[in-house]
Amino acid sequence: VAEDRGRAQRLAAILEEEGGFSLPYGPVRTNLVFFCLPEAVFPEELENNWTGDETAQSIIGEVLSDLKDRHGVLVGGGYGRGGRVIRAAFHMDVHDEGLDRTAEGLLDVASRWIR
């Protein structure tokens, strides 16, 4: 469990520091990382608009589909704050290679969507 939490904390740090992702619930304390895509992924009119807009939901769905198709990484979306929170879970089947692939994949697909 401690290794899973450590991997989750490393992913959170990478996403914040290198990708401009936000952690809406604060620092990671478990094996779960809750994060939001960088605001620049969304059209200007949706920045800082957390109302669960269908356009935002569509973009998130496409980004996560792109992540799965390009990198084989599956994370969950549609959590709090208007459905913009995404969750990545680390467990006994996710090792350092999975952490690396997840971080690289998220940074890659987010950069493809930034306007």
Image (cartoon, rainbow, N blue to C red):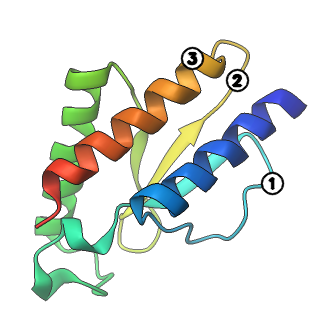
The kind of residue on which mark 3 rests is: Glu
Tell me if 68 is positioned left or right of 95 in this view. left
Picture layout, residue 101 above or below residue 66: above
Give the residue at mark 1: 29
Mark 3 touching mark 1, by CB under 8 A? no
| Quadrant housing residue 82 | bottom left
Q: Counting other residues with Cα less than 10 Å from the Cα at mark 1, is it few (<14), some (14-19), or many (20 or more)?
A: few
- Residue plotted at (63% across, 70% down): 25
Which mark is on residue 58?
A: none
Disc 3 secondary structure class: helix
Left or right: residue 64 versus residue 115 is right
- On the rendered structure, is 96 left or right of 15? right
Q: Position of residue 114 (x, y in %)?
A: 17, 62
Looking at numbered disc 2 in the image, what kind of residue is underneath it? His
- Quarter of the image with the C terminus in it: bottom left
Between the C-alphas of marks 3 and 1, the distance is: 21 Å
Element under disc 2: loop
How far across and down, in percent of the image, does residue 39 sit?
Answer: 29, 74
Instruction: Provide the residue designation for mark 3.
Output: 97
Between 92 and 106, the residue placed more toward the observer is: 106
- Mark 2 or mark 1: name the one nearer the start of the chain: 1
User: What's the distance in space between the residues labelled 3 and 2, CA to CA?
Assistant: 13 Å
Camera sees residue 107: yes
Callout 1: helix, strand or loop? loop
* Dot 2 alpha-carbon crowd within 10 angstroms: few under 14, some 14 to 19, many 20 or more: some
Q: Cα distance, mark 2 to mark 1?
A: 14 Å
What count of labels does the image hold? 3
Q: Residue at x 11, y 87 (%)?
A: 45
- Residue drawn at the location 43% of the way across and 74% of the way down: 81
Which residue is disc 2 drawn over? 91
Relative image position of residue 84 (x, y in whole percent):
36, 64
**Type of the residue with mark 1:** Arg
